[in-house]
Image (spheres, helix red, strand yellow):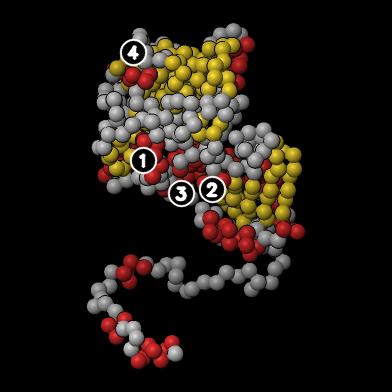
Amino acid sequence: MKARTFRTWLAHLESTGRLVAIDKKVSLEYEIAAVAKKLDGKKAVYFSNIENYGMPVVSGICSTRDDFAEALETDQYGIIPKFTEAVASPKACRKVSNQDAPVKENIITENIDLLKTFPIPVHHEMDSGNYITAGLFITRDPVTRKQNVSIHRLQISGKDKLGVLLLPRHTFHLYKQAEEEGRALECAIVIGVDPVTLLASQASTPFGIDELEIASALRSEPLETVRCETVDIDVPAYAEIVLEGKILPHIREPEGPFGEFPKYYGPRSDKEIVQLTAVSHRKDPIFYTIIPAGYEHLLLGGIPREASLIQSVRQTVPSAVAVHMSPGGTCRYHAVVSIKKRNKGEAKNAILAAFANSFDIKHVVVVDEEVDIFNMEEVEWAIATRFQVDKDLVVVEGAQGSKLDPSTNDGFGSKTGFDCTVPLNSEPMRYKRISIPGYANMDIQEYLNETSSGVNPEHLEYGNRRNDSLIS
C-alpha cells in the first residue's frame, strides 16, 4: 500500500517526481507557507533546513483529487463510492505494543516546550501566532468507549498549552458533557499520518462512529494503533508526533485571528484550552503542516462532505449520479449535483436536498449526467445554455449559513439553486451537444510521436507574392 504510513507516502511522492526538497534555509514565519502555497496543487514540499531547528517540515502531501484517489487505490470517480462504503462499514483497528509503535521511540512527560521542540509555522500575516494545522484531534466517549477524530486549528498559547477552536460538533459535544460534570476531557493530537487516515478523520458520520475504524476500512489492512502514555486514547502507531493532554473545564483564553478556509480571517475570541501532559514522537520526526485555504485543506474538507451529500440527495432523487464540492466555493459553499432526470421537478428537489445536507452549502448547480461536474468550464457552460432565471432559479431567504462567510450576518443569509438540466419535453436537436466522430477515443500521442521534417518552408514565408495576394 503506497499510503500505508506518512513516510511510505512521501517515498512514493518522491519516486514519482511529486515531492520537491528545499535545502535553502527558511523561516517559520510566513516563508514555509509562501513556498508551499507557490507549489500548491503541483508538488509536495520537504523543507530540510528550518531556521533554528534540526527537524524537517512537510506540506502538500495530497493537494489534488488524483492524489487522494491514488492513496485510496482508485480513480477520482471511485473516491466517493469507496469512502461511502467505508463509512457504512468501519473495521476494527489492530492494537500494538509500545515496542512495535515507532511513535513511541521518544517519550517526554516533563518540561514540555512545543516551540523549542517542533518547527510550528506562522502561516498568514494577521495570524495570532504559531498554529498546528494538521493535527488529528482524538477524544473518547467514556460511556461507549468509541473515539472521535477531527481536525481543529490549534494556537500555541504557552510552552505546554494550546488554544483550540471547537465548533458545535462531536468533539464539542463530548467536551460539554465533561465540563458540565466539572472534569477535563482527555485528548490526543496526532501529527504526520498517512493521507487515508487523514481523509477518514473528516468523515461526516452520526455521533459514535470512530473515524480511525473508517481508516481501517479504507486500507488493505487494519490501521495499527497504540495506547497513549497519560490519557486513555489510542493513536496511529506510525504517526510522526503525538501530543497528549486535556481540554480544561470552565477556562477560556484569547485565540485568533487565524486565516481560515474561506480565505478570510477567523476573528479573535475566547476559546477552550488544552493542557498538555506528554509528547511522543518517532526518531528524527517530520513535522507536517497544512497551508490553510490551500488545495490540501479544501479537499480534505470537501471530499468527505461529498460522500455525505450524495447520500442525502439520493434519498430525495434516487437517480443522482455524482456530486462535487468545488474549490472555487472553498469545497464548502458550492455544490454541483449530477442527476439522470426522469421526472419534471427533480432538479429542484435535488437543490433542496443539498441545502438540507449542510448549512454551509450556499449555491447549488444541478446538471444532467453527461456534464463533467469536475470540469468547471463544463458546469459554467451548462449554466450559460440551460438556465433561465425566471423558471430555473431557487432562492431560499433567511437561512442558516457559515459564520465564516463574511457576506452573511453572523451566518444568517440566503441560498441559491440553479436548475441547469435539459427539459424532458425538449426537441431532440435543441440541446444535442456537438461532437467530432473519433475524438473521444483518439490517442493524440500517436500523432505527436510521428517523425516529421517540419513545416514546409514555403508555408512560413511572409511578404511574398502569394501571401500578399491572400491579404490584399
Residue at screen point 65% across, 62% down: 386
Mark 4 residue type: Ile
Question: Residue 144: where, in percent of width, then height?
Answer: 55, 17
Q: Is residue 443 left or right of residue 76?
A: left
Rounded to the nearest angstrom, the CA distance separating label 1 from label 2 is 21 Å
The residue nearer to you, when weighing 30 against 307, is 30
Looking at the rendering, in which quadrant would you find the N terminus? Answer: top left
Q: Are marks 4 and 1 in contact (CB under 8 Å)?
A: no
Residue 256: horizontal and vertical position, in percent? 52, 26
Residue type beneath disc 1 = Val
Depth check, mark 4 against mark 2: the one in front is 2
Write down the residue under mark 2: 328
Q: Find residue 216 and report its image quarter.
A: top left
- Residue assigned mark 3: 76
Give the mark, 3 or 2, whose residue is nearer the N terminus: 3
Decide: is 35 above or below 100. Answer: below
- Please give the residue where the numbered disc 4 appears in the rendered image: 108
Of the image marks 3 and 1, the number of the one nearer the N terminus: 1
- Badge 2 amino acid: Gly
Residue indicated by mark 1: 35
Q: Residue at x 52, y 39 (%)?
A: 263
Q: Which residue shows up at 60% across the image and 61% down it?
A: 382
Res. 84 in view: no
Camera-side residue of 122 and 262: 122
Q: Nearer the viewer, mark 3 or mark 2?
A: 2
Tag 1: Cα neighbours inside 10 Å, few (<14), some, or many (≥20)? some
Mark 4 vs mark 1: which is more N-terminal? 1
